[in-house]
Amino acid sequence: MDIATLREALLWSTVINYGVLLWWFGWFVFAHDWIYEFHGKWFKIPVDRFDAIHYGAMAFYKLAIFVFNLVPFLALLIVG
């Protein structure tokens, strides 16, 4: 695999992962109560804890996108 192909794959991976993150955020903002009720059937947690879990998971996912997709893409862009 050459650098150009790897760079393109990392770019598309970044775009797709940010799409998933925005989709998740959209659902969380616009359907918060429904999601909380849906998960509340299995897990008995307060709303503030539920929000903190989602916020922390979104932050972790965003950081993982940076580390595993965006930074390698930028490094290959600089090198190649």
Image (cartoon, rainbow, N blue to C red):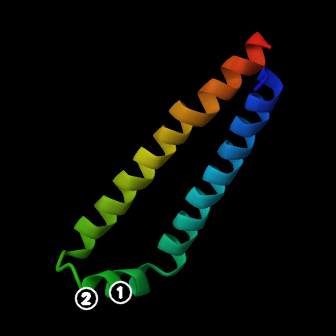
| Position of 12 relative to 80 (above/below) | below
Residue highlighted by disc 1: 38
Question: 23 left or right of 4?
Answer: left
- Secondary structure under the numbered disc 2 in the rendered image: loop
- Secondary structure under the numbered disc 1 in the rendered image: helix
Amino acid type at image mark 1: Phe
Image x and y of residue 11, in percent: 73, 38
Contact? badges 2 and 1 (CB < 8 Å): yes
Q: Which residue is drawn at 54% across and 78% down?
A: 30
Q: Which of 3 and 78 lies nearest the eye of the viewer?
A: 3
| Position of 59 relative to 54 (above/below) | above
The N terminus is located in which quarter? top right
Question: 4 left or right of 20?
Answer: right
Q: Residue at x 57, y 69 (%)?
A: 26
Residue highlighted by disc 2: 41
Image x and y of residue 67, in percent: 51, 31
The C terminus is located in which quarter? top right
Q: Which of 37 and 74 lies nearest the eye of the viewer?
A: 74
Residue that lies at the very extreme toward the left in this rendered image = 44
State the CA–CA distance, disc 2 to disc 1.
6 Å
Q: Which of 53 and 72 lies nearest the eye of the viewer?
A: 72
Image x and y of residue 32, in percent: 43, 78
Q: Which residue is drawn at 42% across and 87% down?
A: 34
Which labelled disc corresponds to residue 60?
none
